[in-house]
Amino acid sequence: MDEQSQPLHERGGNRSQRPTSEAFKRFVAEQWGPRPETLPTVAAVAPFAAARRTAIGARFPGDRLVVAAGALKVRSNDTDYRFRPHSAFAHLTGLDTDREPDAVLVLHPVVHRGGGPSDGDDSGNDGAPSHEAVLYFRPRAERDSEEFYADSRYGELWVGVRPSLEEIEAELDLRCAHIDELGDALRKDVGDGGVRLRVVRDADDTVTAEVDEARPTGDPDDEGEVQDAAVTLDAELTEALSELRLVKDEWEIEQMRAAVAASVAGFEAIVRALPEAVAHHRGERVVETTFAQIARREGNGTGYDTIAAAGNHANTLHWIRNDGSVRTGELVLVDAGVEVDSLYSADITRTLPVDGTFTDAQRQVYDTVCEAADAAFAQARPGTRFRDVHLAAMRVIATRLAEWGMLPVSAEESLDREQGEQHRRWMVHGTSHHLGIDVHDCAQARREMYLDAELEPGMVFTIEPGLYFRADDLAVPEHLRGIGVRIEDDVLVTSDGCENLSAGLPRLSHDVESWMAALTR
């Protein structure tokens, strides 16, 4: 075969020198020890995941619900990112980091006595569950198979020992089936049988296409309407799955506590590393990697790209390049969170004086941001609307900016959302967002369930006001230019108020100074 006759799609394997002889195939299948016969115990998350599946099933009686883990994502050529399952899939199964790419969870409607699906009661019309959950995935192959040694996606010699159907069933207390059975399972009773399909469309394009193919096509002239109706069904499922996470269960709250505790350790390490950061020409990278080491060692890694923004870089809200210097006399804003193995992530920001002491100008800005955060904390209690947390922080910000002579109108005029908001020039982001298995959790929830909703015990969100005075902003007094401050904490709503989960990191300016001094003695 000459060079030009080899198809382009085959050339990616030209580096491979995998053995193919029959002698090799016979020998590689021999002389392996027995696999363990003991099945894993039921994971702590299993009963909580089962309760979540029951809750979502009750929202959609008679419908088949399809939630895929997702596929591996290419980083470069044939190199993939470490696998992270879709958040809805992880939430409903309990499978976490690097677990079962291409798997699909299906909630099948249960047919009860009388021949029809459940009527929508979460326990069915006769006390039985409304849906049966089945996890479809590719179990490990036997050692005499080609997959064992040749498949870089699933092969045991490439990715380690993968689980059997029985092992996952035991771990998750959830029925499992081979992924090859998925197609027939999706099509069963669809259409004339009365079963509708719903799928999380953005989780896995291949699975979504398979669901669309299994759906009734109807009259060719109505194809557009049929597709629009299907997309609507799917959007309702995605919305409901997002809203299911608005109130965390006991297991989720413990995961959040673990993520925050690991993040506190990461910030302590950053303070100790500041002299090294000052000495390095890319000191922001020293800050970033110091936290990353703790995050990877104590958890799955960072929950998002760390912001390590020194000096004027702090005034770029999503500064993740982190290639600047860290200089004494300046501040460094660090926005970072550890994602634990369950995929739950903290999200904390501290703004630190590089040499351990705030200047007068820095303290002026920092203490105002802290005051705004305190006002938001006072609103974080059951019965308060989510949006009121933000409004409380904004009232402080607007008042102080007016006192400093920075607003062209009064504080009250600036707080008018229709005709004002001049104060938002220096804080264009919101004060809070829900937090959990996604850093910006519950993002597909309806406005009335999110911004306009009353806070409930079990909700977890951030409080993160800031002030950002760019060095080239001529509307800012000269002595404040180049200063950027954000203080962010993770908050759990309780029955009578809120708990600051990240209280292990000092917030008040004098406490920050004392804390930094103690860590660097």
Image (cartoon, grey):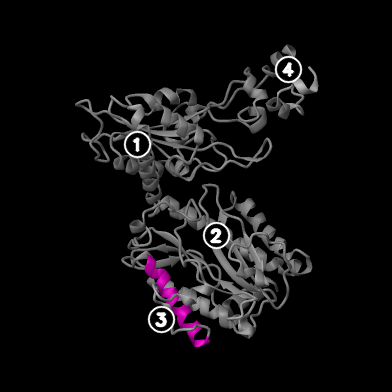
Residue 481 versus residue 339: which sits nearer the camera?
481
Q: Which one is closest to the eye, mark 3 or mark 2?
A: 3
Real-space Cα distance between discs 3 and 4?
77 Å
Real-space Cα distance between discs 1 and 3?
48 Å
Say whether residue 130 is left or right of residue 17. Answer: left
Q: Position of residue 301 (x, y in %)?
A: 61, 51
Q: Secondary structure at mark 2?
A: helix
**Could you tell me the amino acid type at mark 4?**
Thr
Real-space Cα distance between discs 4 and 2?
50 Å
Residue that badge 3 annotates: 413
**Could you tell me the amino acid type at mark 1?**
Glu
**Is 386 placed above or below 175 here?**
below
Residue that badge 2 annotates: 261
Q: Which residues are magenta?
A: 387-405
The answer to whether residue 424 is seen in the rendering is: yes
Which callout, 2 or 1, points at the residue further toward the start of the chain? Answer: 1
Which callout, 3 or 4, points at the residue further toward the start of the chain? Answer: 4
Residue 394 sits inside the magenta stretch = yes
